[in-house]
């Protein structure tokens, strides 16, 4: 059995050496054949130079470097495409995914599981963040066509057939949490204690990025927001019809009175805002269709230490699926 480690990197020059040392110690203790596929996502801080040095010193290291920052989803996709192992572990390079859990993942894989998922606890997280996260997962699981679990990220082991299943999904707008759930296969989950980042290292997950990520999850695996627009429109139509009847009856019984100015302005403003929200939802879906129709590559490679024959990717097959040049 051969194990592959896929490690997306973006501006990790400060921690990449420590991570590689910790990972190497764990893999040596496991005693299995392995490769480490680092994917440099257009770093600007010298991460690529650090990966080149690691590759020169360690023959198990393979690296890919993008021409610019294409995002973590593209980095994970590239790593999965070039990983050759029978089992593939995806983990971050910031040491928040403990390397010592790899042995446990392998033990569960050998029991026959195709996905071995490590879920972090929320120990040490701010109470407000925990509350919003739980509310978000409750909401998205009411709407989405797949089940997303709170605290579950990209840190997991995938069997070869699970990896091949993911590579069949060529959509441009990728939401890996949903894709992992969508492919199915036998899965098992275990928890590990939350590892907090060093005090001098700020999280890249700002409120805006978390909000955008939340919208991606909400829109990627269902069309219920569009259905909701229909229901809200029907509800408002019914309310408007009822109000019109009430005005007519009131005019017949009590005569015509001057309607309230504040009520009128509030109704116009509220309905106008609701229409803009609904147009925004429709625009999000149309924008995703727009990007899918362009069929642009998910990433462009700038540098790698792999054999040129391994880097060649065949053109799309007649059924629209891409095949790899291995």
Image (spheres, rainbow, N blue to C red):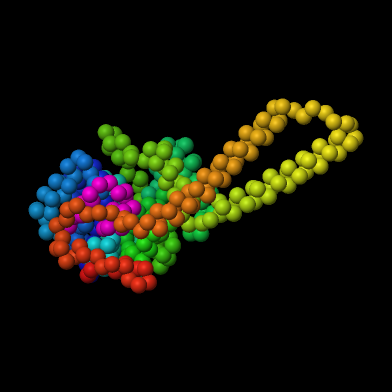
Who is closer to the viewer here, 295 or 262?
Answer: 295
Residue 276 placement (x, y as % from top left): 56, 41
Pick the quarter of the image with the N terminus: bottom left
Residue 16 in the image: state x and y as whole percent.
20, 46
> Among all residues in the image, which is located at the extreme left?
57
Q: Residue at x 37, y 52 (%)?
A: 153
**Residue 263 to residue 243: above or below:** above
Residue 67 lies in the magenta-colored region: yes
Q: Is residue 149 above or below residue 170?
A: above
Q: Is residue 276 left or right of residue 241?
A: left
The segment highlighted magenta reads 61-79
Residue depicted at x 23% and y 68%: 325
Camera-nearest residue between 267 and 142: 267
Left or right, residue 22 beside residue 270: left
Q: Residue at x 30, y 40 (%)?
A: 197
Viewer can see residue 5 = yes
User: Where is residue 83, by image quadrant?
Assistant: bottom left
316 horizontally vs 307: left or right:
right
- Residue appearing at x 24%, y 65% in the figure: 313
Q: Nearer the viewer, residue 210 or 273?
A: 273
Quarter occupied by the C terminus:
bottom left
Q: Position of residue 46 (x, y in %)?
A: 17, 42
**How many labels sit on residues?**
0
Quarter-of-image position of residue 102: bottom left
Query: Can residue 175 be seen by looking at this rendering?
Result: no
Q: Is residue 242 magenta?
A: no
The correct choice, above or below, for 180 with respect to 203 in the image is: below
Question: Which residue of the protein is positioned furthest toward the right in this rendering?
Answer: 253
- Residue 123 horizontal/vertical position (percent): 40, 42
Q: Is residue 92 left or right of residue 221?
A: left
């Amino acid at each position: 059995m051969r194990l592959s480690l896929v490690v997306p990197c973006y501006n990790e020059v400060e921690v990449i050496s420590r991570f590689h040392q910790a990972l190497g110690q764990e893999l040596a203790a496991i005693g299995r054949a392995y490769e480490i596929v680092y994917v440099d996502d257009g770093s600007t801080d010298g991460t690529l130079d650090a990966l080149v040095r690691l590759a020169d010193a360690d023959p198990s290291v393979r690296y890919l470097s993008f021409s610019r920052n294409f995002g973590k989803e593209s980095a994970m996709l590239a790593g999965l495409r070039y990983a050759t192992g029978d089992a593939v572990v995806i983990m971050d390079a910031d040491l928040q995914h403990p390397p010592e859990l790899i042995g446990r993942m392998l033990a569960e894989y050998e029991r026959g599981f195709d996905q071995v998922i490590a879920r972090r606890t929320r120990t040490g997280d701010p109470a407000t963040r925990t509350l919003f996260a739980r509310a978000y997962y409750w909401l998205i699981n009411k709407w989405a066509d797949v089940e997303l679990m709170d605290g579950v990220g990209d840190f997991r082991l995938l069997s070869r057939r699970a990896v091949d299943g993911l590579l069949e999904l060529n959509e441009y707008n990728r939401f890996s949490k949903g894709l992992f759930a969508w492919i199915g296969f036998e899965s098992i989950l275990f928890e590990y204690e939350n590892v907090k980042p060093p005090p001098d290292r700020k999280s890249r997950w700002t409120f805006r990025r978390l909000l955008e990520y939340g919208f991606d999850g909400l829109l990627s695996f269902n069309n219920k927001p569009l259905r909701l627009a229909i229901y809200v429109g029907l509800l408002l139509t019914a309310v408007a019809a009822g109000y019109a009847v009430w005005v007519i009856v009131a005019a017949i019984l009590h005569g015509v009175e001057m309607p309230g100015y504040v009520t009128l302005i509030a109704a116009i403003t509220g309905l106008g805002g609701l229409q803009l929200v609904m147009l925004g939802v429709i625009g999000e879906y149309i924008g995703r269709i727009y990007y899918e129709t362009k069929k642009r590559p998910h990433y462009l490679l700038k540098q790698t230490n792999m054999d040129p024959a391994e880097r060649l990717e065949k053109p799309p097959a007649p059924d629209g699926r891409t095949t790899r040049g291995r």
